[in-house]
Amino acid sequence: MNQPSFDTWTSVFLFASVQGLFVSIVLFITGKENKTANKLLATLIFLFSVTLFEYVLYWTKYLYYWPHFMQLTENFPLLFGVILFFYFKGVFGTHELTKKDLWHLLPFLLFTIYQLPVLLSSSEIKQAWMENKRVLPSLFMWPEPLRGWKWLAWPRITHMIIYYCLIWFTFKSHSTSNPEVRVWFKWLTGLFLAFIISYTSYFVLVRFPFFSVEWDYMISFSMMFTIFFIAWFGYLQPKVFSGFSLVESVQLPVKYKTSALATDVSNEIVDLLDVAMKERMLYQDPEIRLEKLADAIGTTRHYLSQVINDRKGMSFFEYINSLRIEEAKSLLADPNKHKLNVIEIAYQVGFNNKVTFNTTFKKSTGITPTEYRRKFASVVLKD
């Protein structure tokens, strides 16, 4: 048996695996807004990290010395789509997870039972298998699971494709109200699709003579990129680690099932809202949320959301961002504020980062903040 060793790529993948474990721990213990969604995302990153770690052990030949990792993650792909589906359910608030949702785990449980002959084998038997000695037991009188590992990949691939489509068509419409939501949804689903493609490519290319270990790295690279992306996006958008709770960012398709607000009550909430925004400028708070604003003006989040939808004609985040953009336009056009750079203005009006500010500003005005400032600077010079 060859001596265990690391190369550049396996070292990078090991680092990504460790980072993923760290990110999953951070996600699991944080999440003030949406703990359930955070724990689901943490679980997904944890499974990716453990899978990546098993791959590293396999490539470096250290799996022989850590034999109980053998085939441990084989059925994890049957959980990736399910967890991501549950995660977006929690994020968009479309459904509370109940015991009835456990049926989604049935394929994983069935395939795990099939893998029991491998998973329950001793270290010696697993090491013997790695030495090409066909000694794995056959429980329940069925064929050795490892002999059928390639065909077992196709049900997993089909399962992931089904859940990708289910996620995309179920939640795509919910992600259009807010730029931050749209970017997060598209990237996370896009990375899941990239993983499916790389996973599928491996089981296609492995049949050809030109296949090499570098092709095998594709799957790990997609998982590594997902881990790095979530860590990076979490740095830019703290809401990833505090727990996305985007119910308020989605325009409600129907009225509340409770009775409509009386006109005088609605007028009073609008007045309180206008005062809170014009005098207290609560929209400048980068952590403002529907519930926090409702508490500030002395109403409920449901009443406030209904008033914003009915009287302002937009969702909560659209309303907040519209106020931020109006103030930003005023600051950009003010020659006395020319010393403020764009990112300073973004922070001052309540945005967390320059990317979201630029995207929202351009969507509202058709031009970037820098172009907007130049436009008004040229007007001043002409005058």
Image (tube, grey):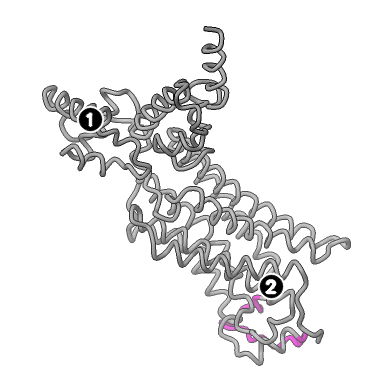
Indicate whether 37 appears above or below 175. below
Question: Label 1 belongs to which residue?
Answer: 273
- Rendering coords of residue 231 (x, y %): 54, 57
Work out whether residue 346 or residue 67 is closer to the camera in this orientation and state it: 346
- Rendering coords of residue 332 (x, y %): 47, 25
Whether residue 137 appears in magenta in the rendering, the answer is yes
Whether residue 168 appears in magenta in the rendering, the answer is no
Q: Which tag is nearer the camera, tag 1 or tag 2?
A: 1
Q: Which residue appears farthest toward the bottom when viewing the image?
A: 124
- Rendering coords of residue 358 (x, y %): 53, 32
Mark 1 or 2 closer to N-term?
2
- Dominant SS in magenta: loop
Q: Badge 1 local density, few (<14 within 10 Å), some, or many (20+)?
A: many
Question: In this picture, which residue range is highlighted in magenta?
Answer: 131-145
Work out whether residue 73 or residue 284 is closer to the camera in this orientation and state it: 284
Indicate whether 11 appears above or below 256. below
Image quadrant where residue 337 sits: top left
**Residue type pointed to by label 2:** Val
**Residue type pointed to by label 1:** Leu
Work out whether residue 309 or residue 11 is closer to the camera in this orientation and state it: 11
Disc 1 vs disc 2: Cβ atoms closer than 8 Å?
no
Image quadrant where residue 3 sits: bottom right
Residue at 51% from the left image edge and 53% from the top image edge: 235
Question: Label 2 belongs to which residue?
Answer: 56
Task: Name the quarter where the N terminus is drawn.
Answer: bottom right
Indicate whether 252 appears above or below 52. above
Q: Secondary structure at mark 1?
A: helix
